[in-house]
Image (cartoon, rainbow, N blue to C red):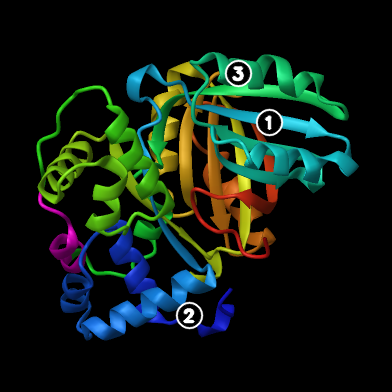
Amino acid sequence: MVKSDSYDDLDRQLVHALQVDARAAFSRIAAVLGVSDKTVARRYARLRSSGAVRVVGLADPYLGGGMPWLVRVRCAPAAAGEVARALARRVDTAWVRLTSGGTEIVCALRGGADRDGEALLLEHLPRTPRIEQVNAHCLLHVFYGGPLSLIAKQGALTPDQVRRLQPEPTAGRDTPLSDEDRRLVEALGRDARAGFGELCRVTGWSPSTVRRRLAELRGGGALYFDVDFDTRMFPGRAVWTMLWLTVDPRSLDAAGKALAGHPEVAFAAATTGATNLHASVACASVPALYEYLTHRVSTLNGVRAIETAPVLRGVKHAGPLLSGR
């Protein structure tokens, strides 16, 4: 991992540029940033090889009737690490984090509509030794997250630079994913900047077909891109915390939209369960978190209760690479 004090403005601009268009040519990014193609390529190679940045392609979790879940698993302290690693090895978990003093695991489950997802939620976890409690929250509506990233709230790029980097809008096609589509998405999940030669190899398609289908999937929202990044790259994001809010149902939509606009919020969604609004937030310090909770979150209309769960370590990532992992 790159030392936190070695990141500079160009690193941050490059990461923001990749969030705007993960597959933009280095020459296009270089022209917008006002540097050479070689400089952009060299910076990206440095960040990627050190593990500070990873660009991934992800399928819409609601695609094909999917039901994404947040699962909270409370364990005996000695078992949490082992259970978290086991969850991280599953292909249906998007990310896994240790929270609450190391006794709770929170993970995002991509599926839940199929039999294997149900088995994880209803059978495997509760029967695992040293697991004390399992709570599953279906994601009903995402207010901020997915293709929207905390990177966009950092201001590394100007609005004009963002506009120049945005890909041309393309009409999508609302069709089920074929086997070739799934192989394409899987390859982009390993590396969103994979070359067309690799994408042709895994799909069996010609370069023109890969380009066309990639544009269709992006245009229709079936595929989006995200950037995993070392949060130390952006100052003021040292303390990551998960919030579980209980909100009056009449105020839920307004509260979720208000949270989505907060600069501290990386993810916000309405959920099922005893708490009905979840958010992942990043603050500069513990005092800053206290200030945010008491002066911003608590004043949202309809908020009746707030539960906080500090993130200790990221075990599996599909969003920011939490420093100190």
- Dot 1 falls on a residue whose secondary structure is strand
Residue matched to label 3: 273
Which stretch is magenta? 160-168
Tally the marks. Answer: 3
Nearest to the observer: residue 306 or residue 160: 160
Q: Few, some or many C-alpha atoms within 10 Å of disc 1 (few <14, some 14-19, many ≥20)?
A: some
Q: Amino acid at mark 1?
A: Arg
- Dot placed on the residue nearer the N-terminal end, 2 or 1: 2
* CB atoms of marks 3 and 2 within 8 Å: no
Is residue 247 left or right of 262 when viewed as pictured? right
- Dot placed on the residue nearer the N-terminal end, 3 or 2: 2
Q: Quadrant of the C terminus?
A: bottom right
Q: Amino acid at mark 3?
A: Gly
Residue matched to label 1: 72
Answer whether residue 314 is magenta in the image.
no
The CA distance from mark 3 to mark 2 is: 40 Å
